[in-house]
Image: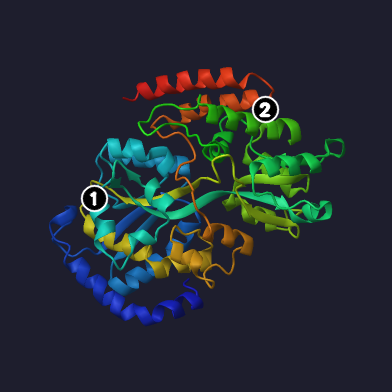
Amino acid sequence: MITRSRRNRRAALAAPLAFALAAALMACAGGGGSSSEKVTDLTLIAANSPWTEGLKDLATEYEDETGVKVNLEFYGNEQLNDTLKVKLNAQSSDFDIYGYQVQDVMREFSRNGWLADMTDYVESDAGWNWDDFQESSRDAVTLDDVVYGVPVMTERHIMYYRADLLEAAGIPVPTTLEELDAAAAQLNDPANGFYGIAMRGAKVPLVTQFSSFLYSYGGDFQDEDGNATVDTPEAKDAYAFYGKLLKDYGPPGATNMGWPEASAIFAQGNAAFYLDADSQAYTFLDPASSAVVDTVAYGAFPEGPAGSHPYSIVPQTVGINEYSKKKDAAWEFIKWVTNEENSKTLLADDTVPSARDSSWADDAATASFPAGLVEIVRNSEGTVGHDRPQLEKVAQAREIVGAPAISAIEGGDVDSAADKANTDFQDLLDGEK
């Protein structure tokens, strides 16, 4: 059901918008792979997410305003990827728009010719305003200067901390990684089951969170030419620092922890700091599962030697099926559902973290988000649009580049581990050329 607030916000725009969209859809002839016949329906498939929940209402509005029915099919992430690969490999045109995970499949899908080039679409309408999308989000959906989708959700690395403990100890909120290290050391009390910090420590899950440390030390997984760079001095220092935090101030068994285990330690009140994605904020605000509802606070990712460069990624984007016969009509719907008004609506009513700067700048749209988190997003600079190596075989790459962090956590030889990881990673990259 469309909420009253949503109806009120849209009522004034409905009539002129319906006329404009109807005219555009009637004009969908020839170009972009569209049929010359008037489009009456579209099909969109995507993974379950807050965005797809909000999309249910918006699809109904779109049909009411334009007469175009948007059929929705939602899956779990793995089921979606399997479904997409089967259908696209068969050059199926029975769906027009699809959501996908940029970091995991965009390179494979674009190489196979499964994603339509949307560059002209996103750059053709000044009123829709492609430049309003966060730079890191635009970068994330662009490959070799080709835009393959529109980002509909964002996620960034932040610092959660216990405001009560810092205040009681007279510790300022850390703004640098050195300050974080000192604060975690001061608050660490393992004899009483309390730890200075909790983070992901398992080899594969930690890679995405380690990325912000790597960037903030001045490194990256690859250079501008795509070659492996996890053996640079900057990378080795980042590995050593990440490992030190968990080795010296983290909970026992850290190398077996992904985000569910690490976040649970913070939620139970057993850690002073927790660094991870901002999408987990509501985990700590639920009294049913959190003992830190009244004491959790939010800070920007601390500065490293090269500044603060946390990841800001796109966990879901929408693209157009290259084999669709309704590309122009598909774009009209994508353009409408991702415009400034609807992006604000989704942020306000469904807490969908928009990729648009204008959404986060709107006080009414952000009213249901923790104020501290909103300020972090509004003041984000220097973010990086990827949180893992960039290649098709990303799962294998994560196994490789996560290994030096394990060595660091366990007190091993980080330099040797990084050298080996770089050789193995480069071999993997060479295999894709």
Q: Is residue 124 above or below residue 103?
A: below
Quarter of the picture containing the C terminus is top left
Residue type indicated by callout 1: Ser
Q: In this orientation, which residue lies closer to the viewer: 289 or 381? A: 381
Question: Does label 2 or label 1 sit earlier along the sequence?
Answer: 1
Give yes or no for contact between labels 2 and 1 (Cβ–Cβ under 8 Å): no
Give residue 27's position: percent from left, percent from top: 16, 66
Residue 191 falls in image quadrant: top right
Mark 2: which secondary structure?
helix
Give residue 200's position: percent from left, percent from top: 63, 37
Q: Name the residue rendered at 55%, 46% in the picture.
A: 308
Residue type indicated by callout 2: Ile
* Residue density around tag 1, few if under 14, some if 14–19, many if 20 or more, within 10 Å: many
Residue 407 falls in image quadrant: top right
Is residue 388 at least partly visible in the picture?
A: yes
Q: Residue furthest right?
A: 192
| Cα distance in 3D space between marks 2 and 1 | 49 Å
Give residue 181's position: percent from left, percent from top: 71, 39
Give residue 219's position: percent from left, percent from top: 50, 34
Q: Name the residue rendered at 32%, 65% in the picture.
A: 128
Mark 1: which secondary structure?
loop
Q: In this orientation, which residue lies closer to the viewer: 46 or 353? A: 353
For discs 2 and 1, the disc positioned in front in the rendered view = 2
Q: Is residue 405 above or below residue 328?
A: above
Q: In this orientation, which residue lies closer to the viewer: 347 or 414? A: 414
Query: Where is mark 2, residue-wise?
Result: 409
Is residue 251 at least partly visible in the picture?
A: no
* Residue density around tag 2, few if under 14, some if 14–19, many if 20 or more, within 10 Å: many
Residue 32 falls in image quadrant: bottom left
Q: Is residue 100 above or below residue 431?
A: below
Q: Residue furthest bottom?
A: 12
Query: Where is mark 1, residue-wise?
Result: 324
